[in-house]
Image: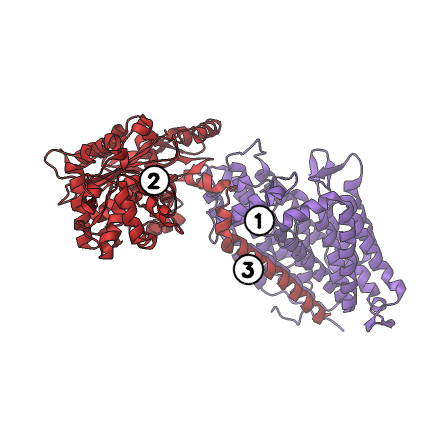
Chain colours: A red, B purple
Amino acid sequence: MTPEIRRVANVILLMFLSLFIAASAMQVVNADSLNNDSRNQRAVFDGYKTQRGAILVDNNPIAESNSSNDAYHFLRKYTGEQYSAITGFYSLYQGRTGLENYLDNSLRGDNSAQFFEQLNALFSGNPVTGASVELSIDEKVQQVAWDALGNNKGAVIAMDPTTGRIIALVSKPGFDANLLSTHNTADASANYKKLLTRKDAPLINRAIGGDLYAPGSVFKLVVASAAFESGKYTPQSTLPNPRKYTLPGTKTTITNSGESNCGGAPKVSIATALKLSCNIPFAQLGIALGQDAIAAQAKKFGFGETVTIPMKSTPSVYPTGMDDSQTGLSSFGQFDVRVSPLQMVMVASAIANDGIQMQPYLVDQIFTSNLTLLQQTKPTEIRRSISTSTAESVKKMMIAAVASGVSSNARIPGVEVAGKTGTAENGVGEPYTLWFTGFAPAKNPKVAIAVVVENGGGFGQSGRGNSVAAPIAKKVMQAVLGK
Amino acid sequence: MAKPKRVRVMPAKRNLELIMLLFTFGVYAFALAQVQLATIQVLNPEAWFFWSVPVVLALGFHFLLRLKASDADPLLLPIGFFLNSLGIVMIYRLDLAKPMADLDRTVGQRQVIWMAVAMLIAGAILWGIKNHLSLRKYIYISMAVGALLLVLPLLPVIGKTVSGAHLWVNLGPLSFQPGELAKIALTIFFAGYLTSRRESLAVVGRKVLGIRIPPARELGPIAFIWLASLAVLVLQRDLGTSLLYFGLFLVLIYVATARAFYVFVGLIMFVSGAVIASKFMSYVGGRLDGWLDPLNDANYSAVGGSYQIVQSMFGLAHGGLFGTGLGGGLPQIVPLANSDFIVSAIGEELGLVGIFAVLAMYLLLVARALRVANAHSDDFSKLLAVGLGFVIALQVFIVIGGVFRVVPLTGLTTPLLAAGGSSLVANWIIIALLLRLSDTLPKAGTVN
């Protein structure tokens, strides 16, 4: 019987071996996908077991976790709607968005930088306290930007062009994140449904995408940059300046904004065309450059890329496969060109920063509950978008646009402002999308800005970038410069 | 052959056993303290009850062994105590968990009482049965008792259905799973029956297609057991129980006759029988779907679908390699976490390392049983020890394999860990029998 018993022993060993393997597969190999399953309540409960770190602006919490007398121990509290586009929300059953989502690991103390704390927690049984996050946002500027937008739908994003530090990021309408962080699940889910179905879509972060906008004339900065980078054009290069222009291969005629004569001369320089924001010269310039050259320049400015700030932006789009007429339309930011305000502030910043594009960021520091610094953001270059000379040329044209051109409402007494307005059409009868992007002071830039206002700022097709968006940008830049 | 005269020497094995027991007592005390500190944040005198009753019982059992079976295997009692006390820790921890619903909060206390009952019965058996060979006289009584126990849950009035399976009887306020005791009675019966019939069963018959077929009349018993197993499957509606008895029989007939033929034919018969039976029983199909694709939304939300196993999978993944620590996880989310899914609770809080430790304990327990089987010289003792060891191994495989999705979920209990009296009584009796078997090993005059 002995050999038979040995064979039975081998069978038993195999049975146990299969258990060892299956257990390892479930608890280690497949653990991540199981932990991330949306039906898994444990992640939700887990998140409330530790005191989540705060999100701070100038040392004041804009999101923090306070003790609550219920099964979840901590309730997330938010200060105001002006920060909703930054914090996002942290909810029991609706999940999380914004920084609450992208910094979740740090906020709940599960960051690899907190390894020793976690090790300590493993042995002591005391849960790790979440790390807190200090943002680059300036409280005053953020408030000014929020107020300046008024009742408009739109977004403002301001950053330091030399470092990429984001000083203000506003998307309007905002929402009260406390409505979603409540532990009363019936309330939270009703509130969520309400926010989700509201026509003005407060849950969309207009500053970094979600929806993209037609840029209109602010896109001329990209086309002008492409022209100078090609080496074939300078700001003084001239283009034919007819009152009406028929797009090649079509019967469609275009005019300049307001059917202006763009200075009235038979030929107009690129500098004047940008200053007065004339569409016809730029359509011709774009066609002459070709869509490939413009696409290449757009890509160098970051089109087609997701930017992590650490929220993820929606990539801006320069269309491909256009015919000449479409290239012409796209050269003044119409047709299917679509951008986010973040993208435009990155374009303005590169021009301001001698052609070098900096990585935009929202988080200055991450530190533990006992104030040990875990992470300090250092400014990093993304790339050189344009040469120094191109940056200088475009900058000069932008200064002229504000000082003596059609972007005049961004003028600040005593400060040289560089800027470009945009008034994008959205189809027959639709209200315009209004833009301003620029920077100040022009010679020693402290702030670059992009402002977008939807729905013509309430003025339908009579709203203009210069009348609606430029004054908002002016107020924000003034707040930064203290003027 | 005359046995050498037995000499009582210093009971080294008992001393070894005592040292290991003291270790398990210490681990048990730490675990209870950890559970209280993690769940109710204070040490509560209740822990004394949970600790002292099992510890006194184990020490009593230990001294009984010194008196009545001083040469018995020194590992069996510590392993049994370790697994049983770990089960109590986990059950108590689930009692203390913030209740997800109106749950019974005294399961842990009752488990301690049941452990006492089980160890007292096991002690009485050890005391009463001086030599297991005397069990050979009762093999047909064992068969009758085993059959009766299997039929009990099907009887009206006392029979009780739990999640579709008819495995329970109600005795006043207590409910009992007689199948647990039946496995012991049937092991004794199989061992005795096969000892007397192994010669004729092993007879070489005609050769068909290169395979030697035993004479037809010898296939009678295997056909009978096969039908009985299928009857259990169909009537009690539990694949696990049915597989346990049939697997036990196949292994014992294989060890007795050395004929792999029985295993092949038996497995083919069982699988085909089970497949045919499943065609006629809707609940089997649902169980299979839930097993093969538990994360599928349709299976997850189906009534009797994969909700439970998926919750258990989430818990196990949550535990990961090292676990959340006792009291740190949320094992109470899994339905029946203290019985059918106690392994899932252990895996969540003690991690994969905890699961490995538990599996290693079972493996060691089974290995000791097989070692005893090898060392005995008579057929009955060998078969009895293999049978008792294998029945634990197979049950562990079916239950824990169900949790880890190696096999479909069934209604068997996790030996020594799961909440439930009948299971504890049955498994402590098995340990008592293994202790007795190991004490009566033929000796070469010295203690090895």
Are the numbered discs 3 and 2 placed on the same chain, yes or no? Answer: no
Q: Which residue is mark 1?
A: B343
In this rendering, would A399 be left or right of A203? Answer: left
The three-letter amino acid code for the residue at tag 1 is Val
Above/below status of A275 relative to B200:
above
Q: Chain of mark 1?
A: B
Residue B29 image position (x, y, % from top left): 49, 47
Query: Where is the N terminus of chain A found, in terms of image quarters?
Result: bottom right
At a point 80% along the width and 39% down the height, the residue shown is B155
* Front one among B62 and A367: A367
At a point 33% along the width and 46% down the height, the residue shown is A328
Closer to the camera: disc 3 or disc 1? 1
Q: Which residue is mark 2?
A: A253
Residue A374 image position (x, y, % from top left): 28, 49
In this rendering, would B342 be left or right of A437? Answer: right
Question: Distance from label 3 to label 1 (Cα)?
Answer: 31 Å
Q: Chain of mark 2?
A: A
Q: Which residue is mark 3?
A: B15
Q: Chain of mark 3?
A: B
